[in-house]
Image (spheres, grey):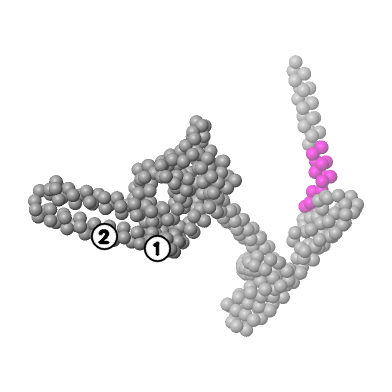
Amino acid sequence: MFRVLAFEIPRQLVERKLEKLSEKLRALTCGGLCSSAHQKRKSGAEYELKQERYLNERARFLATLQDEVSNGREMVCAKYQISTDAIVALVEQLGGSPAVLSKSHIEDVIWEVNDNLDGLVSFEEFEKSYMRSRVDRTGLEPSELFFIIGFLMFDKERSGRIVLDDAMKIFYLKYGDAMEKEMEIHFGSKLDEGAQFIHFAEFYDAILKRAGELIDQQASISKSNKSIEMTGSTRSFNETVEKAKDSVKTMLTGGVAAAATGAVWGAGLAVLRNESIKFYSASMGTNFFLLGSTYIALEEVIADKTGAKDLKTGAAAGGLTGGFFAGVFGGRVRGLQGMAAGAAIGAASVFGREQFQRWRLAKGLERYEEKYGTAPAVYYPNTDILVETKGPVRDLEMPSLLPKSLKVTDEEIERRIQARVAELRQEELDSSLSKSECV
């Protein structure tokens, strides 16, 4: 097929051009084309130059044919290339539609496979394009040249039509096991009509239409994937926002607790020193709030990076907090002292927090086992404690942090509910009695 497009069709084009040029020269000699002698001489000179060029091209083709007798047809593959004019002449001969016949469209077809961008298709480019199209099952590989070649393989006489069975063979080369599906998509109406032949114009129009559909489908898939990516990004963003909210909430809660502790401590100092309680409470409360909120914020950041909230995390957060505030207000030495003190306090805070959580978990297990028997495997989220036991899965009843005087037991809640129900029933009974007396 490469020889047909690169050698035979161009040779036929040269022969046609020579025939037309000979007719023009004969007409010129007879005086039918030009009105003046000057125009005759000018036109005659131009035609003779063209004729010489075409004769040289024909001589080159004939020389190749002579060389092929001794060296084989492989020479054509090395010496010739497929041009735009050759494909235009072919599709014109096959009866292609006006859209296919346009030179700009054929130039696009060549550009799709022309790796070195010289406007011509070499044998190497031709072979690579053919193999790429054969192995492609998506239909997205540029394959117009492949289908032209496929049609030409079964239309050796270039009559412009092939039987549908031959079209099926072309589609098998391209789509493999999906051949029947693609035949139905491309030529469903022809198959339903029981047609035996398909013309090149119908064949090629169906190819172009299907190529557009596949491109649209790919665009839709890409848009859907982009939407999924954006959804994933949105979800990730929302998770980050929620995480930030939790961190801010923890920081403010810890800061308020530290401020309350500082306010109480300041009030105690004010009483001992006989100073203003309001001033000392406000001052110590503010300082403790800054220290506490900064420490918790740093602990959250470090824990997020390291993936653990342990003694090292607490010591690092405490050291940074103490070193920063002591260094700002007291200088370098105070900063180092504050860093050491802050690291110790931070580590002690984490240790105390973990011991408190261990105590709460232990008490919860004791209460569970007293009520239900052996406790289940329990993982408490604020520590690394994992209690391996057996038993039904039930919630643990953790000790309350509220004083007993403020805590309302379940029994007390039930008693109050029953008392309120009794009151409502008595009110309803009294209302009924009042209505009956009125009657």
Query: Quick check: marks 2 and 1 in contact, CB under 8 Å?
Result: no
Residue 210 lies within the magenta run = no
Q: Nearer the viewer, residue 31 or 326?
A: 31
Give above or below for 308 relative to 403: below
Indicate the amino acid at tag 1: Asp
Give the side of residue 325 with respect to residue 104, left or right. Answer: right
Q: Position of residue 389 (x, y in %)?
A: 87, 57
Answer few, some or many: residues within 10 Å of disc 1's Cα (few below 14, many 20 plus, some between 14 and 19). Answer: some
Q: Which mark is residue 67?
A: 1
Q: Nearer the viewer, residue 291 or 90?
A: 90
| Residue at 35 percent of width and 49 percent of height | 89
Earlier sequence position, callout 2 versus callout 1: 2
Answer few, some or many: residues within 10 Å of disc 2's Cα (few below 14, many 20 plus, some between 14 and 19). Answer: some
Residue 411 lies within the magenta run = yes
Q: Which residues are magenta?
A: 405-419
Q: Position of residue 252 (x, y in %)?
A: 63, 61
Give the side of residue 37 with respect to residue 212, left or right. Answer: left
Image quadrant in which you'd find residue 324: bottom right
| Residue at 51 percent of width and 42 percent of height | 166
Indicate the amino acid at tag 2: Arg
Image quadrant in which you'd find residue 236: bottom right
Give above or below for 342 relative to 434: below
- Check disc 2 and report the residue beneath it: 53
The dominant secondary structure in magenta is: helix
Q: Secondary structure at mark 2?
A: helix
| Residue at 76 percent of width and 25 percent of height | 431
